[in-house]
Image (spheres, helix red, strand yellow):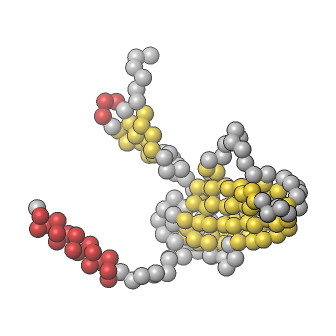
Amino acid sequence: MQIYWSLTLSLAVTGAALAPAGAAPRTHSGKDARPLVSRMVRLNARDDKPAAPVAIAVVPGRVTAAGRQEVLVTATPGVRARQLILSVRAGDGLVVASRHADHTARGEAKVPVTRAVELAASGPGQRRVTVTATLVFANGARQTGIAAYLLNPQAPRVRPSSAGSRRVDTPDGRQILELPSGNP
């Protein structure tokens, strides 16, 4: 067993050392120009939690190529600020293909700032997009609103477990253990 474990570990280390560092991500997931975004779920959206005075929205746009799609990102400040810094990050099977994922604009109250950002599939994954909108005030204070989206979530996977309980994987990646409550 010890020899097998050492051989497996040395093969894994050798394979990792031979893998090309910084290989460019794949930017398409298929041959046809299907949309990357067919459905979005906003994560951690709670009305009872204090938030920055900025509203963030992400709307799917046009398909630009196979595995690429534009999304329109809008941030609307609720108050006047010296500056609004809008930033878009992607992960888990998705990359920002636009050159400028960050945008700075004047922070006028109730005036939306919209930016088109191109997203590209980079491989398998749940495809997440995180948008931050930071308001910079005249006195140097900052407030940041964050919106995280899960693109194209699948239905929860249910796995049977022992004693009548079951594990459920939710679309946003959480695992829930459901236990029977007894006789109704």
Indicate left or right for 97 with 111 as reference: left
For the C terminus, the quadrant is top left
Q: Residue at x 45, y 81 (%)?
A: 23
Left or right: residue 56 versus residue 180 is right
Residue 29, image x and y in percent? Answer: 51, 71
Direction from residue 148 to residue 115 in the image, left or right: right
| Image quarter (top left, top right, bottom left or bottom right) of the N terminus | bottom left
Q: Nearer the viewer, residue 144 or 62?
A: 144
Q: In the image as oriented, which residue stretches furthest toward the top?
A: 184
* Location of residue 107 in the rendering, given as x and y in whole percent from the top left corner: 85, 63
Residue 12 visible within the image: yes
Q: In the picture shown, does residue 113 fall above or below 183?
A: below
Q: What residue do we see at 21% from left, 74% from top? A: 10
- Residue drawn 63% across the image and 60% down it: 130
Q: Position of residue 154 (x, y in %)?
A: 52, 51
Quadrant in the picture for residue 20: bottom left
Residue nearest the viewer, comparing 29 with 91: 91
In the rendered view, does 138 fall on the left or right side of 168?
A: right
Of the pair 131 and 127, the residue shown nearer to us: 131
Residue 86 pos. (x, y %): 73, 66
Q: Is residue 88 above or below residue 13?
A: above
Residue located 59% across and 57% down the image: 151
